[in-house]
Each structure stands twice: as structure tokens, then as C-alpha cells.
Image: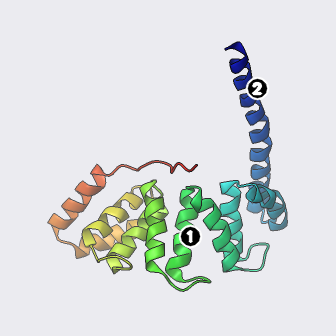
């Protein structure tokens, strides 16, 4: 029993030794990115992304999507977003949903966009909640449902997402009071599923 405990402690210490440098590399990349030193950010993030770091994968996707330090490449953006999204990363799922909704480098696919937005929104991501509300309002990939549109926009607006704040104001002019009341009830009853667990 003593040996098992000793092995557990050694493994814990090794994980700390590995995690601290990885996190430091990510932060160095973030610092470079904020200074708009995209070459340095890529230098820090690319090795992390290749080793499966979801934050670095998401940021590489972002840089390829917007052509920051690299030639704009929607296929590469989708690749890196997908790697992180498959690991349950909510922001990457939202970003991947936007790729499909807007048809960036792929045929426009509302069903695929909806799938990624929903996974992200269910984790509590405000951006994805806003997108999901918009898709319900427009009937993109799903039956039009103004109550669900308001619910998701309301949840997003509660997090301060500006387009959602505007969407709620707009919907309050469009919906009947009983629809708004029902949507708010659904929003108040909703709880995030929490982070996705991947094996």
C-alpha cells in the first residue's frame, strides 16, 4: 500500500512538472499574440497544438481563420478548431459552428453548425448561445421557434454578449408578453451541462 501511495505522489509531481512548462509556453504565446507578434505566438502554440493542447489548437484555428501571421486558410482553421472541439472545448465548438454556418471553406451547413453551437451552448458558452438563438429565430437547420430564440439570446445576454443584448431588445418588440414570460421561465430553469468529458 505504501508503494502504491508513493507511485501516486510521483505521478502527481511529474504531471505538475509537465503542466507548468506547457502552461508557461501557452502564456508566452498569448503574450506575443496580444502584442501582435504572430510569428512568436505561432512558435509557442504550434508545438502545443500538435501535442493536443485545446487552447493552442483553438488559437491556431483562429489565426488561420483571420490570417494572423499566416495566410488565411479556412481548411486549416477548421482542422484546428475540430481537434479542440472534439475534445469538448466550448469556444472551439462555437468557432467551428460559425465556420459551417457561414460556409467558410465548406458548403454552408446549418445542421452541422447547429450541432456544434448546441454542444458549446449547453456548456454555457455565451457566443454559442447567441448563435443558437439566432438559428432558432431564422429557422436555420431547425424549426423556427421564437420562444427558444429568446431563451438562448436571454442566456447569452445575461453573460454580456452585446449582439444577444440587442437581440433580446428586438425580440421583446416582436413577441407577445406570454411568449417572453415562457422563454424567461425556460431560461431560468436551464442549467449548463458543464464541460464535456472526453476519453
Q: Residue furthest left?
A: 178
Q: How is the image coloured?
A: rainbow
- Above or below for 185 versus 102: above
Mark seen at residue 96: 1
Q: Position of residue 55 (x, y in %)?
A: 66, 55
Badge 1 crowding class, 10 Å Cα cut-off, few under 14, some 14 to 19, many 20 or more, is: many
Q: Assign the N terminus to one quadrant of the image.
A: top right
Mark yes or no: residue 157 visible. yes
Badge 2 crowding class, 10 Å Cα cut-off, few under 14, some 14 to 19, many 20 or more, is: few
Residue at 77% across, 46% down: 22
Please name whichever residue, 136 or 11, is drawn nearer the observer in this view of the structure.
Answer: 11
Q: Which residue is mark 2?
A: 10
Relative horizontal placement of residue 107, taking residue 46 as reference (left or right): left
- Above or below for 103 versus 183: below
Relative horizontal placement of residue 122, taking residue 38 as reference (left or right): left
Relative horizontal placement of residue 144, taking residue 2 as reference (left or right): left
Q: Residue furthest bottom?
A: 107
Q: How many marks?
A: 2
Amino acid at each position: 500500500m505504501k508503494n502504491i501511495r508513493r507511485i501516486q505522489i510521483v505521478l502527481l509531481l511529474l504531471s505538475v512538472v509537465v503542466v507548468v512548462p506547457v502552461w508557461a509556453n501557452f502564456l508566452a504565446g498569448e503574450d506575443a499574440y496580444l502584442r501582435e507578434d504572430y510569428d512568436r505566438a505561432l512558435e509557442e502554440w504550434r508545438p502545443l497544438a500538435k501535442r493536443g493542447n485545446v487552447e493552442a489548437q483553438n488559437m491556431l484555428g483562429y489565426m488561420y481563420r483571420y490570417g494572423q501571421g499566416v495566410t488565411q486558410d479556412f481548411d486549416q482553421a477548421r482542422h484546428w478548431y475540430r481537434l479542440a472541439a472534439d475534445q469538448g472545448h466550448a469556444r472551439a465548438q462555437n468557432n467551428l459552428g460559425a465556420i459551417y454556418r457561414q460556409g467558410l471553406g465548406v458548403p454552408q451547413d446549418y445542421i452541422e453548425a447547429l450541432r456544434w453551437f448546441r454542444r458549446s451552448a449547453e456548456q454555457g458558452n455565451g457566443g454559442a448561445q447567441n448563435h443558437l438563438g439566432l438559428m432558432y429565430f431564422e429557422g436555420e437547420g431547425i424549426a423556427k421557434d421564437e420562444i427558444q430564440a429568446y431563451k438562448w439570446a436571454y442566456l447569452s445576454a445575461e453573460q454580456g454578449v452585446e449582439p444577444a443584448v440587442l437581440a433580446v431588445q428586438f425580440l421583446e418588440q416582436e413577441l407577445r408578453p406570454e411568449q417572453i414570460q415562457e422563454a424567461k421561465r425556460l431560461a431560468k430553469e436551464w442549467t449548463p451541462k458543464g464541460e464535456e468529458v472526453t476519453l
